Image (spheres, rainbow, N blue to C red):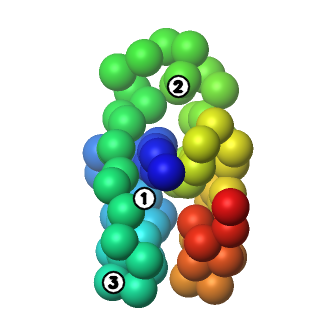
Amino acid sequence: MEIIYYGRPNCELCEEGIRTLNLVREDIPFEMTEVNIEEDDAIHEKYMLMIPVVEKDGQIIQYGALDYVTLLEGIRSK
């Protein structure tokens, strides 16, 4: 399982999203790759209005205001 977290520095919603993902990680261990959208023009254009974005195995689980239940169910699902 691959979890990718798209965000950017100095983004309060992104920082809150990381905290929520860390709570989920306490219940379901997983590895996560953090991607700064400002380092890639194509990714920035794709996600700039959506961040934070959580992706699992190429599928977006949730974006914007992240919540524990949606993330837990999305990461847990096969």
Q: CA distance from mark 1 to mark 3?
A: 19 Å
Kind of residue at disc 2: His
Tag 1 secondary structure = helix
Q: Is residue 51 above or below residue 24?
A: above
**SS class of the residue under badge 3?**
helix
Q: Does 58 sit above or below residue 12?
A: above
Rendered image: mark on residue 51 = none
Q: Are marks 1 and 3 in contact (CB under 8 Å)?
A: no
Q: CA distance from mark 3 to mark 2?
A: 29 Å
| Residue type at numbered disc 1 | Cys
Give the residue at mark 1.
14
Is residue 66 in view?
A: yes
**Residue denoted by label 2:** 44
Residue 18 in picture, x, y percent from top left:
37, 66
Crowd rating for badge 1 (residues with CA inside 10 Å; few <14, some 14–19, many 20+): many
Image point 49% across, 13% down: which residue? Answer: 41
